[in-house]
Image (cartoon, rainbow, N blue to C red):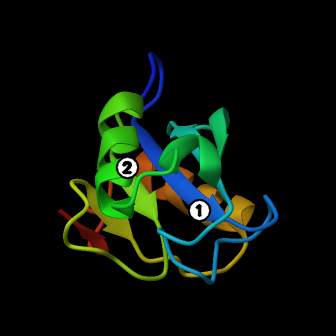
Amino acid sequence: MADKGFNIKVLVPTEDGFTISEQGIENAPYYLCYNISNRSYQLAEKHKAREIFNDKSENVTAINDIVIKLKIDFILCKTENNAVRCGFIKPQTNEINKMLNILIDMVDQKKELLFFNQ
């Protein structure tokens, strides 16, 4: 659930803050959380992997915990994990800002987001 004034909230695994992780959701060193509206996106939170996993042996459980805690609607990731309790968006581009702008356009046009899996 996005913050007030925004439509959706996405979690983005990344290595560098600019591109979507090639390592998948469970192996990325950083996670960025964005609120998206029909006009803009805003960085809501950022986390290091060690903050999320805290020596937990089960990464999927830790990811599900953060999804619930941050009220994430979707994860922007190249691979999906059916054990994670939210939708996945497969990116059309590796660059985070370009993909977020695509999502803004889709929210603005109120299009059915066919590549969303829930």
Q: Quadrant of residue 16?
A: bottom right
Is 92 placed left or right of 65 in the picture? right
Is 85 placed left or right of 81 in the picture? left
Q: Position of residue 6 (x, y in %)?
A: 47, 28
Residue kind at label 2, given as amino acid type:
Ala
Label 1: few (<14), some (14–19) or many (≥20) C-alpha neighbours in 10 Å: many
Nearer-the-camera pick, 114 or 59: 59
Q: Is residue 1 at least partly visible in the picture?
A: no
Dot 1: what SS? strand
Dot 2: what SS? helix
Nearer-the-camera pick, 17 or 51: 51
Q: CA distance from mark 1 to mark 2?
A: 14 Å
Rendered-image quadrant of the C terminus: bottom left
Q: Residue at x 56, y 72 (%)?
A: 27
Rendered-image quadrant of the N terminus: top left
Is 37 placed left or right of 39 in the picture? left
Q: Which residue is mark 1?
A: 13
Residue kind at label 1, given as amino acid type:
Pro
Q: Quadrant of residue 20?
A: bottom right
Disc ID at residue 27: none
Q: Position of residue 65 (x, y in %)?
A: 32, 41
Q: Position of residue 7 (x, y in %)?
A: 40, 34
Q: Residue at x 21, y 54 (%)?
A: 85
Label 2: few (<14), some (14–19) or many (≥20) C-alpha neighbours in 10 Å: many
Nearer-the-camera pick, 47 or 19: 47
* Total marks in image: 2
Closer to the camera: disc 1 or disc 2?
2
Q: Are marks 1 and 2 in contact (CB under 8 Å)?
A: no
Disc ID at residue 62: 2
Nearer-the-camera pick, 11 or 28: 28
Q: Is residue 73 above or below residue 85?
A: above
Q: Is residue 93 above or below residue 69?
A: below
